[in-house]
Amino acid sequence: MTRKITNKTVAIVGTVALAAVIASTSPVWTPLFAKGSQMTGFKRFPPEHFFSDPKQIALGKAIYDGDLAAVERLIPGTDLNKPGINGGTPILYALQETVPVEQDGSSKRFAILSALVKAGANPDPDSADSDKPGALDFILLRKSNFAFRALLDGGLDPNHLRHGEEPLIFSVASDDLMPSLKLLVDRRADIDKRDSLGRTAIDEALASYQFDAIDYLLAHGANPKNVDRLGTSFAWAVQVALNHVDPNWPRRPRLLTIRDRLVALGVTWPPTPPKVLRERMRAHGETPIPSPVLDK
């Protein structure tokens, strides 16, 4: 079973429920959701708690000590992606050790993360026989972006597909994760990279009303005229939202502002219905995703 611990999951099941899920799948990360660097109940564990392989234990000791030079010396010859006790890997162990210094971007513990990724440690493993979350799953839930920066510094592709499916930028298209979104854009991530449904990051942000993220993406060149493989345009999704949210919702004016911004960017309003766009797709030799509802 492919694991799916993403920001979508947080939105659906909530922080408390997800914490319970992760605690049950990863012994490395029990105190995940304490805020900031004051990690309530955080307890350090020696590497023997997570590894039985002697080389992984030795590397783990260097990680525990925060000894970057020793980590770099021990990395060659150590299997960085071999699951240890209960599925833990060296990069997950190193990530645990960044918890107390989460707000200190100068800490060598982030350099250790970079060194591991540079040497081949996979922060986002996708295994058909594992439902355990990887380091990237945890890092993308942090408001601080130092650990995320460390992965990118180590060579993580800004256009990486999470679990082989979803563009990395989707995971940070959130008002709460603006530092990570800005970092990814600074690293020249493709703002308009599409998922298997043809959706882009602004579609992802709109799905949970992340208006700051939408404004930022549009300001940095996101395509306001994107049409997904269902024949649904971003503008149409905005109109649907306007039609369905409570007229007295305090945040509804943000939707109106986005609508006005789209018009200023040359988007036709009212937007073209999906049925018409689906017919245009077929006329151009494209096959929209089947949807009897949208074809009515």
Image (cartoon, rainbow, N blue to C red):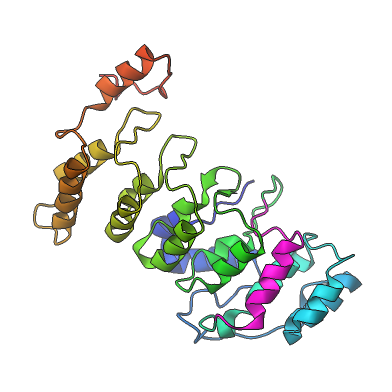
Q: In the image, is residue 124 above or below residue 98?
A: above
Q: Nearer the viewer, residue 27 or 214?
A: 214
Q: Quadrant of residue 176?
A: bottom left
Instruction: Please report the residue visible at 59 percent of the width from the left and 75 percent of the height from the top.
Output: 30
Q: In the image, is residue 154 above or below residue 67?
A: above
Q: Quadrant of residue 120?
A: bottom right
Q: Quadrant of residue 55?
A: bottom right
What range is drawn magenta here?
105-125
Instruction: Please report the residue visible at 86 percent of the width from the left and 78 percent of the height from the top.
Output: 58
Instruction: Please report the residue visible at 51 percent of the width from the left and 63 percent of the height from the top.
Output: 140
Q: Nearer the viewer, residue 100 or 105?
A: 105
Tell whether position 160 is magenta: no
Q: Nearer the viewer, residue 225 or 292?
A: 225
Instruction: Please report the residue visible at 70 percent of the width from the left and 75 percent of the height from the top.
Output: 112
Horizontal and vertical percent for residue 101? 57, 84
Horizontal and vertical percent for residue 295? 29, 19
Tell whether position 115 is magenta: yes
Horizontal and vertical percent for residue 211? 27, 57
Can residue 88 be seen here?
no
Q: In the image, is residue 285 above or below residue 256?
A: above
Horizontal and vertical percent for residue 230? 37, 28
What count of labels does the image hold? 0
Can residue 58 be seen here?
yes
> If the image is split into quadrants, where does the C terminus sit?
top left
Q: Is residue 238 left or right of residue 133?
A: left
